C-alpha cells in the first residue's frame, strides 16, 4: 500500500497528492503541522496557533508505535486540562505519518518557545532535503496567511472528495449490492454499522470499537449534506455522505432501533423474528467482549477482501456500477472467505430474554423461560 493511500482522511490525501503537505521540504512540513493542529487539535484561529509552544508536544514511544501528545488545553480556571493525542500508528491509517510530521518539525525548531518559526532564506538552505527553520517567530499576520491557505485547500479538497464520491462506487455500496450488509436485516445492519465504524471512521483497533458509546456518534447536516461525526479523544472524525445515501441510512436506522438503550454502549444484540425476518430489532443487552471480537474478526476479513478486489483488478478503476458480470466475479472471490457465510453467534430469537447474553456463544437456542 502506498503512502498516499495510507493517509488518514481523503481530504489529507488530496493535499499530499498536490504536494501541499508532506515532509519533502520545510514549507510542506510546516503546512502539515498547521493543517493537523487545526483539524486534529482544534486550533482554529491565528491566536490559537500563536499560543502553541514547542514544549506543549511530546512524542511518546509505545509498544506498537508512537504517539504525539498535545498538552496546551486549559480549563476555565486556567489549569491544564486533559491531553489530546494522536494514538498509536497502524499500518492501515495515516496516523504514523502524522506523528512523523510532528517529530520532524520539532527536531527542526528550538526545544522551547513559540511553535511556529519562519522559513530560512533560500540562500540559507543547504538543500531542499535539509529541513531547518529560522529562530524568528511567525507573526499573527503570518499565521493568518496560513489560515487563508488552509481554508482554500480545505474547500478544494472537499470539492475533490465530492467529485470522487460521485463518480466511483464506494466500498459500502459494493458490500450492500453483494448482500454482505443491509438495512433490512438486524444481523446485516449490525455488520454494516461495525464496518462503517471500522472502515470509514477509522476505528481499526478492537479497543476503540469496544469503548465506543452512542453518545459520541451523531448524524449532523451541513449545507444539505449529512455527516457522521464521531467525537473521540483526539478531536472529531467526520464521514460525509449525501442526505439519502447508504451510509446515512444505515446510521439512522440503527440509531433509531437502539434509541433509549444504554448511552454508554454502542453495539447491541440483534433480534431475529422468525415470523418476519425483514425487521431491524435489537435487544437492550449489549454485545459481550467475545461477540465483539467475533464481529471485529469479520470486519478485518471483509477489509482484506475489499483490498484484494481493488488490487487484482476484479473491480475496474473508476467503476461506478456493479454489473452482473462483475458481481459474479466478486461473489466467486467472496466464497473464499468462510467467515463471511457464518451467522454471528450474538443473534438471539425474539423469544429470548436479556439473560441470553450469558449463554455460551455456541448455544443459539432460545433461553428457557423461568417458571
Image (tube, rainbow, N blue to C red):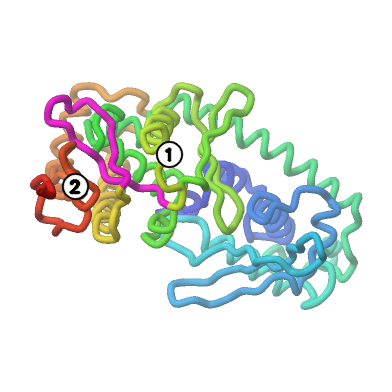
Q: Residue furthest front?
A: 371
- Left or right: residue 167 versus residue 220 is left
Q: Does residue 106 show up magenta in the picture?
A: no
Who is closer to the viewer here, 176 or 356?
356
Q: Quadrant of the N terminus?
A: bottom left
Q: Does residue 276 show up magenta in the picture?
A: yes
Crowdedness near tag 1: few (<14), some (14–19) or many (≥20) residues, C-alpha within 10 Å? few
Question: Where in the figure is residue 37, as x and y percent of width and height?
Answer: 69, 56
Residue 360 visible at all: yes
Residue visible at 62% across and 56% down? 22
The alpha-carbon separation of the residues under discs 2 and 1 comes to 24 Å
Q: Is residue 362 above or below residue 52?
A: above
Question: Where in the figure is residue 56, as x and y percent of width and height?
Answer: 73, 70
Task: Looking at the image, tell me whether mark 2 or mark 1 is earlier in sequence order.
Answer: 1
The label shown at residue 239 is none
- Left or right: residue 324 versus residue 112 is left
Question: Where in the figure is residue 27, as x and y percent of width and height?
Answer: 74, 56
Who is closer to the viewer here, 343 or 123?
343
How many numbered circles does the render carry?
2
Q: Is residue 236 above or below residue 277?
A: below
Question: Where in the figure is residue 161, as x and y percent of width and height?
Answer: 54, 33
Q: Which residue is mark 1?
A: 260
Residue visible at 43% across and 25% down? 245
The label shown at residue 344 is 2
Q: Secondary structure at mark 2?
A: loop
- Left or right: residue 248 versus residue 145 is left
Q: Write the start and end of the magenta stretch as one range.
A: 265-284
Amino acid at each position: 500500500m502506498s503512502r498516499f493511500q495510507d493517509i488518514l482522511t481523503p481530504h489529507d490525501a488530496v493535499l499530499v497528492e498536490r504536494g501541499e503537505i508532506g515532509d519533502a521540504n520545510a514549507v510542506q512540513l510546516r503546512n502539515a503541522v498547521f493543517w493537523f493542529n487545526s483539524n486534529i487539535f482544534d486550533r482554529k484561529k491565528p491566536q490559537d496557533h500563536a499560543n502553541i509552544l514547542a514544549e506543549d508536544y511530546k512524542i511518546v514511544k509505545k509498544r506498537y508505535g508512537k504517539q504525539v501528545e498535545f498538552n496546551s488545553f486549559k480549563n476555565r480556571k486556567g489549569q491544564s486540562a486533559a491531553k489530546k493525542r494522536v494514538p498509536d500508528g497502524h499500518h492501515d491509517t495515516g496516523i504514523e505519518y502524522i506523528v512523523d510530521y510532528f517529530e520532524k518539525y520539532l527536531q527542526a525548531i528550538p526545544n522551547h518557545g513559540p511553535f511556529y518559526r519562519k522559513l530560512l532564506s533560500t540562500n540559507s538552505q543547504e538543500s531542499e532535503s535539509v529541513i531547518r527553520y529560522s529562530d524568528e517567530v511567525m507573526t499573527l499576520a503570518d499565521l493568518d496567511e496560513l489560515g487563508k491557505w488552509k481554508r482554500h485547500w480545505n474547500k478544494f479538497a472537499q470539492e475533490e472528495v465530492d467529485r470522487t464520491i460521485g463518480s466511483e462506487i464506494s466500498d459500502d455500496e459494493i458490500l450492500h449490492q453483494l448482500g454482505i450488509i443491509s438495512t433490512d436485516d438486524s444481523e446485516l445492519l449490525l455488520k454494516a454499522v461495525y464496518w462503517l465504524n471500522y472502515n470509514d471512521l477509522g476505528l481499526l483497533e478492537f479497543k476503540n470499537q469496544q469503548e465506543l458509546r452512542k453518545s459520541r456518534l451523531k448524524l449532523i447536516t451541513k449545507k444539505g449534506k449529512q455527516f457522521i461525526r464521531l467525537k473521540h479523544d483526539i478531536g472529531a472524525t467526520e464521514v460525509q455522505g449525501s442526505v439519502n445515501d447508504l451510509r446515512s441510512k444505515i446510521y439512522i436506522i440503527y440509531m433509531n432501533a437502539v434509541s433509549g438503550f444504554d448511552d454508554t454502549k454502542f453495539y447491541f444484540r440483534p433480534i431475529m423474528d422468525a415470523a418476519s425476518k425483514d425487521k431491524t430489532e435489537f435487544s437492550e443487552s449489549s454485545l459481550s467482549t467475545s461477540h465483539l471480537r467475533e464481529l471485529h474478526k469479520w470486519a478485518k476479513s471483509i477489509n482484506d477482501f475489499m483490498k484484494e478486489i481493488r488490487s487484482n483488478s476484479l473491480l475496474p478503476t473508476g467503476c461506478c456500477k456493479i454489473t452482473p458480470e462483475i458481481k459474479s466475479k466478486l461473489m466467486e472471490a467472496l466464497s473464499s472467505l468462510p467467515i463471511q457465510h457464518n451467522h454471528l453467534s450474538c443473534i438471539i430469537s425474539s423469544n429470548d430474554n436479556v439473560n441470553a447474553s450469558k449463554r455460551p456463544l455456541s448455544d443459539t437456542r432460545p433461553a428457557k423461560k423461568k417458571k
